[in-house]
Image: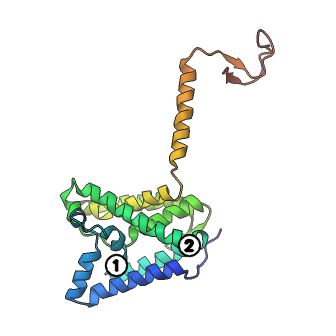
Amino acid sequence: MQFGVPPLTRGVKWLGGVTLAVSILATVLGESGTTLAQSVVFLPNRFWHGWVWQPLTYTFLNPDPIGLLFALLGLWLLGASLERSWGTRRFVTFYLVTGAVGALATGLIGLFVPTVRNHAYFGNWASLEGLIAAFAVLMPNAQILLYFVPVQARWMLPISAGITVLFMLMNISEWYRYLPQLFGLGAGVLFAGGVAPRNFFLRFRVWWIDRRLRRSKLRVVRKEDDAGPFGGSGQGSDKYLH
């Protein structure tokens, strides 16, 4: 799959339209706009006091014009391709849930860190990180333009994580600003199927069985042994007798 300019799909239009409307209204409505912004941003301290809708609404606010432009551009270029593959319902759900998980994980840290608890989070960067993770997991060979440089989608996962960590280190006094992006990337990997609980269980079972076999006194014989009680020619690969 090669990179191309995707069409404007229905889910992308809906999410982009709401983001554009909320961002503009919060900026131009004066006091009413301020009230709107305070309602939709994610503030962990308010969330734990009943403002439970904020993890689903903070992604729609981008008051900075340049940030809004890149937010809408990323939503279009990343989201449209995934929506065509998944369908509108699954895509919109994935977009909102990854952003919400990024906020909730940040809120949990806010329970112990006052600077996180009292910081207002906004923007759809956590959701965009989730979309990048979905590309890396589901379409690893797809070509994505990273600042006009074509990159295979599989490499976007470590690159995105590295860039986020780099920003945290370069702005060490405000490292908490980037927590939703980091958690959104992890949520994207999880919900796109990159980490399956069943696989972890099966791997644990294989490890446990192998460990029991090694600790037991089972005899190791050659696969193609034909001499002795089991035959034996001294040829073949070692296998557990079980």
The residue labelled by disc 2 is 83
Nearest to the observer: residue 70 or residue 48:
48
1 or 2: tag closer to the N-terminus: 1
Q: Secondary structure at mark 2?
A: helix
Protein image colouring: rainbow
Q: Which residue is mark 1?
A: 62
Q: Please say whether residue 52 is visible from this viewpoint.
A: yes
Residue mark closest to the camera, 1 vs 2: 2
**Label 2 Cα crowd, 10 Å radius (few <14 / some 14-19 / many 20+):** many
Q: Which residue is at a point 55% across and 76% down the rendered structure image?
A: 80
Quadrant containing the C terminus in the rendered view = top right
Number of numbered discs: 2
83 left or right of 18 in image: right
Residue 132, position as x, y percentages in the image: 49, 65
Residue plotted at (43% across, 60% down) = 185
Residue for point 43% across, 57% down: 186
Q: Quadrant of residue 67?
A: bottom left
Q: Residue pushed farthest front?
A: 50
Which residue type does callout 2 highlight?
Glu
- Residue 225 lies in quadrant: top right
